[in-house]
Image (cartoon, grey):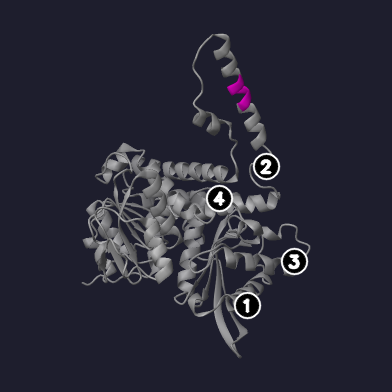
Amino acid sequence: MIKTEPTFRESVDLMFNRAAALMDMPPGLEEKIRVCNATYTVRFGVRLRGGLQTFTGYRSVHSEHMEPVKGGIRYAISVNQDEVEALSALMTYKCALVEAPFGGAKGGLCIDPLQYDEYELEQITRRFAYELAKRDLIDPAQNVPAPDMGTGEREMAWIADQYARMNTTDINAKACVTGKPLNAGGIAGRVEATGRGVQYALREFFRHPEDKAKAGLSGDLEGKRVIVQGLGNVGYHAAKFLQEEDGAIITGIIERDGALFNPDGLDVEAVRAWLIRHGGVCGYPDAGHATDSGSVLEEDCDILIPAALEGVINLENAARIKAPLIIEAANGPITAGADDILRERGTVIIPDMYANAGGVTVSYFEWVKNLSHIRFGRMQRRQEEARHQLVVNELERLSSALGNSWTLDPRFKEKYLRGADELELVRSGLDDTMRIAYQSMREVWHDRDDVADLRTSAYIVSIGKVAASYRAKGL
């Protein structure tokens, strides 16, 4: 019998069901958590290029066990209702896992953003935002979008401005969306947050010898061979940080027009610059080029980072994947069928609902910043510096009084005396979040004989938290 490939939405439901079967939960509550609460489909017209063009968009709300609901808006020609609903479900579980106080949502517009200039995209985005906001599907207290594939700071700034125009007396209007530019109410570190979260997730995994042993790995990240699929915002930042700060070797980079492979390592910054300049990796020097990008996905490496679309590892290629450790930087890059094959082979998978939660974590910080109307660090930074200066002064006084000749290293002194700014506080909060969330997963992974993988562990933790919230509401 030929095994058929589940859809993305079916994959999410299958993985949910696998975890829910291991939990003691009333069937009615299980069903309430699994199903999507509501999906709004909007079709709107925008006058462009001398005519009227009609666009189709979606905003799905999976769970309102906590409000506001949170989830990105993606622009892609492949956007459809099933995909948006599956992504909104993942957002519910993701927020619960990392203890961000949001329900899950997702939005999408069926459009190829490369086919429109900036002015046209602004008109389309503003009209889409208008259609959602007038139905409370964009609101600081109810529904807070963020960037996703095909969108970024620019689109979020347009959405925030459109909401503010429609709600002129809302003092918290900037909190209606996250992922904004710094000068429009954004927060330092948001752009690279998801990629930084992938780095912190890997660092935490490598802190646990027992976990590394399950993947047949040892030591730390230095020297580990890494293949990255997708050098967009997430893949680029994850690869950059792992290479520059942890000493990992990026041996493969996979893009739409092919893939690059060099066992001695690729320069991530150079590849990114080439990609931006030429629109693809074809022609890049100092590396082997494969037109069949899937072949590089199957190359030998220590860590594989799928950081682009869902379903890139599936029934067709799962058996040929050699990486002992896969970290899902994208949403749903491994289908449920492929997940079964990889788990049976002993491949360790760090699941998407945890691995790419850096974005929503820092979005949470941005939302809090917008509601509090003050940047992080403004109240305490100089006080910290003054307190540290007292310690340094006392140490230097004691040294002089005792006739000692030692002095503090100037580099240490400079670092110690500098109070934490917003970026450092954001990184600290993200690191703490990723550590605690991983530990909650691994506790289930190691303590329960009926749980053999991190994905099931993550679902059990997340579903348990959502269930607790619903019970507190009296359901």
* Amino acid at dot 4: Ala
Q: Where is residue 258 in the image (x, y as percent from the top left)?
A: 31, 69
Residue on which the image places disc 2: 378
Q: Which amino acid does label 3 sit on?
A: Asn
In what element is the residue under mark 1? helix
Which quadrant, please, contains the C terminus? bottom right
Q: Which of marks 3 and 1 is in front?
A: 1
Q: What residue is disc 3 on?
A: 167
Left or right relative to 265: residue 190: right
Q: Residue 341, how many percent across, how many down?
A: 25, 59
Tell me if residue 390 is in the magenta stretch.
Answer: yes
* Rendering coords of residue 182 (x, y %): 62, 56
**Residue drawn at (25%, 51%) of the image:** 346
Q: Which of marks 2 and 3 is in front?
A: 2
Q: How crowded is mark 2: few (under 14 residues within 10 Å), some or many (20 or more)?
A: few
Residue occupying the far bottom of the picture: 50
The residue carrying mark 1 is 123
- At label 3, counting other C-alpha atoms closer than 10 Å, the crowd grade (few under 14, some 14-19, many 20 or more) is some
Query: How much space separates mark 3 and mark 1, taking CA atoms?
Result: 19 Å
Query: Neighbour class for label 4 at 10 Å: few (<14), some, many (≥20)?
Result: many
Secondary element at tag 4: loop
For the record, the magenta segment spans: 389-393
Q: Which of marks 2 and 3 is nearer the N terminus?
A: 3
CA distance separating discs 2 and 3: 28 Å
First of labels 3, 1 by sequence position: 1
Rounded to the nearest angstrom, the CA distance separating label 1 from label 2 is 36 Å
Q: Residue 100 carries which label?
A: 4
Instruction: Give the residue displayed 43% in from the left and 46% down from the top.
Output: 200
**What amino acid is at disc 2?**
Arg
